[in-house]
Image (tube, rainbow, N blue to C red):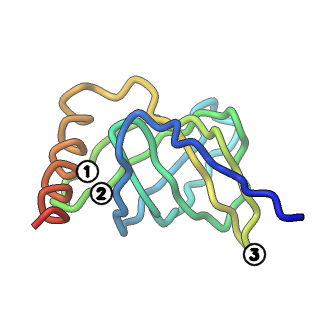
């Protein structure tokens, strides 16, 4: 007997893939080294990324996100999901206290990409 699993989409915003890298450092100062991560998807409310380093779930990290326009968005990320993948990890994080102007830049990208998909 096979069971069908239905996953309900709980995100409030669309997520778009954005190939980029950013530097993350632990906000509470307990981890001072900077690590590079590869972004898998991003929305105005959160980000999915891959990293070789083990980060802490629930921890808040400072980040500098280079977006498609080559501008850098300074943001704080709270890790909400971790999954072991091969030698590295896949993470889900939400933006903490991101200014509306910065979130708007991500939303503009989402709108443009949605229009391209419809054409």
Q: In this view, does 97 lie to the left or right of 99?
A: right
Q: Sequence order check: which comes first, mark 2 or mark 1? A: 2
- Residue 68 in percent (x, y) is at 21, 62
Q: How crowded is mark 3: few (under 14 residues within 10 Å), some or many (20 or more)?
A: few
Please, is residue 9 above or below residue 21 in the view?
Answer: above
Q: Residue 87, which numbered label?
A: 3
| Disc 2 element | strand
Residue linked to disc 2: 66
Question: Does the residue at mark 2 contact the one at mark 1 (Cβ under 8 Å)?
Answer: yes
Q: Which residue is drawn at 24% across and 45% down?
A: 106
On the picture, is 69 further left or further right than 3? Answer: left
Residue plotted at (51% across, 53% down): 48
**Badge 3 or badge 2: first in the primary sequence:** 2
Decide which of 72, 81 is in the foreground and name it.
81
Q: Where is residue 49 in the image (x, y as percent from the top left)?
A: 53, 58
Q: Do the residues labelled 3 and 2 touch (CB within 8 Å)?
A: no
Q: Looking at the rendering, in which quadrant would you find the N terminus?
A: bottom right
Marks 2/1: CA distance? Answer: 4 Å
Q: Which residue is denoted by mark 1 in the rendering?
A: 72
**Vertical placement of residue 100 versus 6, above or below:** above
Q: In which quarter of the image is residue 118?
A: bottom left
The residue positioned 23% from the left and 36% from the top of the image is 102
Q: Reading the chain from its start, which is encountered first: label 3 or label 1?
A: 1
Badge 3 marks a residue whose secondary structure is: loop
Q: In this view, does 28 lie above or below 115?
A: above
């Amino acid at each position: 007997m096979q069971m069908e699993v239905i996953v309900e989409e709980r995100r409030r915003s669309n997520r778009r893939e954005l190939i980029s890298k950013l530097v993350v450092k632990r906000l509470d100062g307990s981890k001072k080294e900077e690590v590079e991560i590869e972004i898998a998807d991003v929305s105005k409310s959160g980000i999915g990324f891959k990293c070789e380093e083990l980060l802490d779930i629930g921890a808040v990290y400072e980040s500098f996100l280079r977006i498609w326009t080559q501008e850098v968005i300074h943001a704080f990320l709270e890790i909400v999901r971790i999954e072991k993948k091969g030698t590295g990890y896949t993470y889900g994080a939400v933006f903490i206290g991101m200014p509306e102007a910065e979130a708007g830049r991500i939303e503009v990208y989402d709108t443009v990409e949605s229009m391209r998909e419809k054409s």
